[in-house]
Amino acid sequence: MNLRTVSLALVCAVSLFADKKDVVKRLNASADVFHEIMKIDDKAIPRELLEKAECVAIVPNMKKGGFIIGAKYGKGFMTCRTARGWSAPSAVKIEGGSVGAQIGGGETDVVLVVMNKSGAEKLMRSEFTLGGDAGLMAGPVGRDATAQTDAMMRAEILSYSRARGLFAGIALTGSTLRSDDKDNEYLYGKPVEHKAILTGQVAKPAGSAPLFSALNRYSVTAAGTSKTKKSNERSRKSAQ
C-alpha cells in the first residue's frame, strides 16, 4: 500500500458521512482543544505570541496511520485578525505523509500560529505547503522569553501538537493545508470564499461563539487592543 492510497483511505474515513452537524461538532472540538492546551500554564503556547499572531488554525484529532509509510489527515478551522477582531472561522484540512519507523495509528491535536502578514496572506490561499510555501518551525512553549523572540523573528508559522496528554512543538514540513470549501458551505449555508471569510467579509456563523470565547480569553485581538489603548488614554486625561 503506497502513501497516496493510505492518504486517500484516511480522507474517505473522515469525510464520507460529513454534514453540517459534524462541522459544528468539529468547530466546538476546536474550541475545546485550544482551551485545554492553554490551561497548561507552564507548557502552553506563550500568550505573548498569541497577542502578536495574525492567524490561528486549530485541527482537532488529526489522524495518523500506516505501517512504515505513514499518512496524516485532519480537518479544523482557522481565523485571522481584522479591524473588528477575529474573523469568522474558515474550514481547513491538512494532508501529508511521512516515511519512517511508524506502526499503528493515532490522533493528534494541531495548532498553527501565524506570526506575520506574509504568513497570513499565504494561509489565505486555497492551498499551500507548510514549510515549502511558508516558513514553518516547531513553536516554543512555556515562558522562555528568548525562545519566543527567536521564534517570532525566524518563522512565519509556529506549529504545535498534543498527543497522549503531551504538548509541544511539531514539525509538519511538507504537509498541505487547504481550504475545505464543502465544510464551509455546510457551515454558512452557501458557497463562500476562504479569503473572504478570513478578511472579515463574512459574518460569524451560529455555533462559533465557544471558539471565539476561548481565543479572546488567551489573546488580545486587534480591536481589543485598540479599545484598551483608548481606554487607557481616557484614564490618563481624567487623572490630569
Image (tube, rainbow, N blue to C red):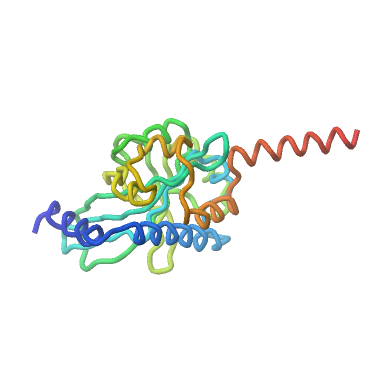
Which quadrant of the figure contains the C terminus?
A: top right
Q: Look at the image and tell me whether residue 11 can be seen.
A: yes
Q: Residue at x 42, y 30 (%)?
A: 118
- Please identify the quarter of the rendering in which residue 40 is found: bottom right
Q: Residue at x 59, y 38 (%)?
A: 222
Residue at far front of view: 189
Of 157 and 122, the residue lying toward us? 122
Q: Look at the image and tell me whether residue 112 can be seen.
A: no
Count of all numbered marks drawn on residues in the image: 0
Residue 59, position as x, y percentages in the image: 38, 54
Left or right of 8: which side holds 82?
Answer: right
Q: Residue at x 73, y 35 (%)?
A: 230
Left or right of 207: which side holds 192?
Answer: left
Which quadrant of the figure contains the N terminus?
A: bottom left
Residue 122, position as x, y percentages in the image: 37, 34
Residue 161, position as x, y percentages in the image: 40, 57
Of 155 and 226, the residue lying toward us? 226
Of 159 and 227, the residue lying toward us? 227
Left or right of 4: which side holds 83?
Answer: right
Residue at far left of view: 1
Of 195 and 206, the residue lying toward us? 206
Residue 223, position as x, y percentages in the image: 61, 38
In the image, residue 99 sits, relative to residue 156, either above or below, namely below
Left or right of 71: which side holds 43?
Answer: right
In the image, residue 17 sits, relative to residue 113, either above or below, namely below
